[in-house]
Amino acid sequence: MACTSCSSGGGCSSSAKGCGSKGGCSSGGCTRLNVFDWLQDVDLPSDFKEFDLVEIRFKGGRKDFFRNSSRLPLVTGDAVVIEAAGNGWHLGHVSLKGELVRLQMRKKKVPIDSKEIRSILRVATDQDVERWNAVRDLETGTMFRARSVVEELKLKMKLSDVEYQADRTRATFFYSAEDRVDFRDLIRRLADEFRVRVEMRQISLRHEAGRLGGIGSCGRELCCSTWLTDFKSVSTTAARYQNLSLNPAKLSGQCGRLKCCLNYELDTYLDALKDIPQVQRPLQTEKGEAFLQKTDIFKKRMWFAFRGDNNWVMIPTERVREIQDMNKRGEKPENLLAPVKEEERAPEVSAHVEGNLDRLDDKIKAGKRSKRKKKKISAEQGQPVAAAPAPKPGQPQKEKTPTLEPSPEPVSSATGGAEAQAEPRRPRGSAARPLNRRNNRNRSDKDNKDQNKPEGSGEGRRADAPRPPRPGNEARPPRSAGNAGGDAPRTGNEGSERNGRPPRRGPRPPRPGGAGLGGAPSTPAS
């Protein structure tokens, strides 16, 4: 469905009030350069006299003010027939009415009692709209034919658009040119060919882009074709204040001029630049002169680099002012960066409340380290430490093996030193554990008794004397399960050197009375 409230016949894609097709046009439609009428739903007093001037929109977003002398009941978006300049009539659409028109006229400095303001003839009928649509279809062919005529005449001008009057009595050609153009021959040829009255109107490149429309580099529709009506001059100083690269391809818009959006944030940049120091000379340091490379205005950071060095140094603006003050006094800092001061870190809240999360792991590790240190110290002192397994429930607890403690008696330098040197080093680990705990316990008791005897008796041996090796290097047989609690039978070579007695021959005789585990030990036969 064609939009009845704008000059383009395309379908409506966005909703906008005042459109006969319940939507706004995507190309030159209702949403272009409209002012929202926030007074349309307000009930006015009965004796209130409505403002009689109405704003009418034409093709390309062009607008003008007309007087509603007949007091027609108009609504925003209605097609009306207005009095054309000179003679004839033209068709347009109501874009604004009421008290907001008074504000717009005051903004554009148009006097209310001006005689140049024409009047509205009537509300457009269906025949008027059909005739206007038929005339609009001729505009595209007329523009291409006029461009070919301009090329034949070799005129330095660019035709951008053509607009026919609704009664097809006048055609307005919009063009842009850098210099003045003599187009008298062009008007004569166009009038003879199209049989209309020709009017040439020069527009700027920005107005031309606004009439044609398009999509900008930001991905949105051009500002000049949607809402921007007043075009202000844009200079390259606006790009310099914003630290933009002076690249014409990036700074220019579709019109070929600098983008209008360069002026949007210029005031914000000017306010932020008040806190940025002006660096007109390089900073003097002991390493050399530092030249300004880049400035971040909003974060207040500046980058400097030494001559011949590609590494940039980032310093805050306060440091730049400090260096500039030092240079004024004739002083040079050692480096661009300020000296680092070590600050005491305040403990975290979690440290006060619950402590470190790894405190349990630290305790376990500390306990393991202390145990290792104790074992190492005891091994160096000659104290074997054997960890006894924990007894199972229901089993009798075995007696602990007594540990050998060093003698507290001092060793004389004459005899004790030689014995200490001749004494071999005691084994450690599993080799230091006794193979038979029961025999070891009996042997330790007998050794303690033997120690009380005089040294010349020759019976027994000292506890600290090394044990001689077994003859024949025979291994001790394993203990059988039946003799777990008593004395197992020994071989002939076993215990031959025990307490200086001769080795036994043959198996051990049985005990009298069939004594088992609880019987008294029998004495060997002579």
Image (cartoon, rainbow, N blue to C red):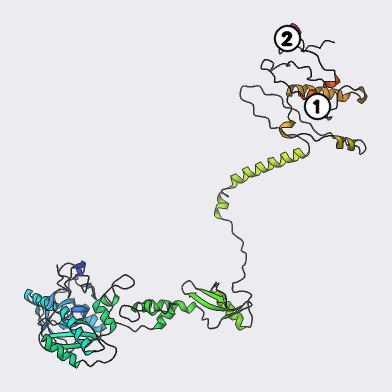
**Residue placed most toward the observer, 83 or 446:** 446
Q: Quadrant of the C terminus?
A: top right
Q: Nearer the viewer, mark 2 or mark 1?
A: 1
**Residue 80 seen:** yes
Residue carrying label 2: 515
Q: Residues within 10 Å of mark 2 (few under 14, many from 20)?
A: few
Q: In the displayed structure, would residue 126 be above or below residue 426?
A: below
Instruction: Look at the numbered discs 2 and 1 and tell me whether their residues touch, using CB distance below 8 Å.
Output: no
Q: In the displayed structure, would residue 362 be above or below residue 140?
A: above
Q: Position of residue 475 (x, y in %)?
A: 74, 23
Q: Is residue 263 left or right of residue 12?
A: right
- Indicate yes or no whether the magenta region holds residue 66: no
Disc 2 residue type?
Ala
Quarter of the image where one finds residue 206: bottom left
At 72% from the left and 34% from the top, the residue drawn is 429
First-in-chain label (2 vs 1): 1
Q: Position of residue 28 (x, y in %)?
A: 21, 74
Quick one: SS at disc 2? loop
- Indicate yes or no whether the magenta region holds residue 515: yes
Q: CA distance from mark 2 to mark 1?
A: 33 Å
- Residue range in magenta is 510-516
Residue carrying label 1: 469
**Residue 50 seen:** no
**Residue placed most toward the observer, 288 or 266:** 288
Quick one: SS at disc 1? loop
Q: Is residue 521 left or right of residue 214?
A: right
At 17% from the left and 67% from the top, the residue drawn is 22
Q: In the displayed structure, would residue 21 be above or below residue 381?
A: below
Q: Quadrant of the N terminus?
A: bottom left
Quarter of the image where one finds residue 487: top right
